[in-house]
Amino acid sequence: MKKRIYSILKGTFLVSDDSFKNWRFILFISALSIIMIASSHSADKKVYEIARLKNEVKEIRSIFLEGRTRLMRRKMESNVINIMKEKGISPSVIPPKKIKVKSQN
């Protein structure tokens, strides 16, 4: 047991006669770790992108709601009447009459 630990600490397992299988295993583990790190970075990028897009959606939604609220206020009858009074137009006091069209058959 001591010899194995010493050979690992000294690195003799990398230069011995049967070290080819050890190097293959080390390269395999290294490749897997590189793939894992790349995958982790890719996932982090996606998380940041999702957070950025969520913030952008919130901002655009608030702008939309603000615009819709302003439009609703401008379309109110009282607001339209005030704007038309400034231009010299007042609402009619005579109620509208229904026009009936008779067919010529």
Image (cartoon, rainbow, N blue to C red):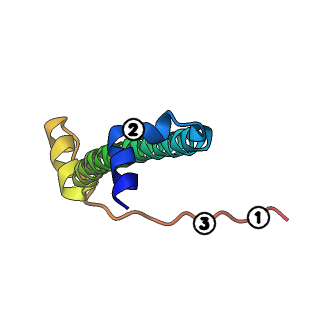
Question: Relative to the observer, which residue lies in front, 63 or 71?
Answer: 63
Examine the rendered structure and indicate whether residue 63 appears above or below residue 102: above
Percent position of residue 96, x then y: 40, 63
Q: Which label sits on residue 11?
A: 2
Examine the rendered structure and indicate whether residue 77 appears above or below residue 27: below
* Mark 1, secondary structure of its residue: loop
Return the residue found at the far right.
105
Q: CA distance from mark 2 to mark 3?
A: 105 Å
The reply, left or right, for residue 37 in relation to residue 31 is: left
How many C-alpha atoms fall within 10 Å of the one at disc 3: few (<14), some, or many (≥20)? few
Q: CA distance from mark 1 to mark 2?
A: 107 Å
Question: Relative to the observer, which residue lies in front, 90 or 45?
Answer: 45
* N-term-proximal mark, 1 vs 2: 2
* N-term-proximal mark, 2 vs 3: 2
Examine the rendered structure and indicate whether residue 14 appears above or below residue 8: above
Percent position of residue 84, x then y: 21, 42
The reply, left or right, for residue 31 in relation to residue 102 is: left
How many C-alpha atoms fall within 10 Å of the one at disc 1: few (<14), some, or many (≥20)? few
- Quadrant where the N terminus lies? bottom left
Q: Identify residue type, mark 2.
A: Gly
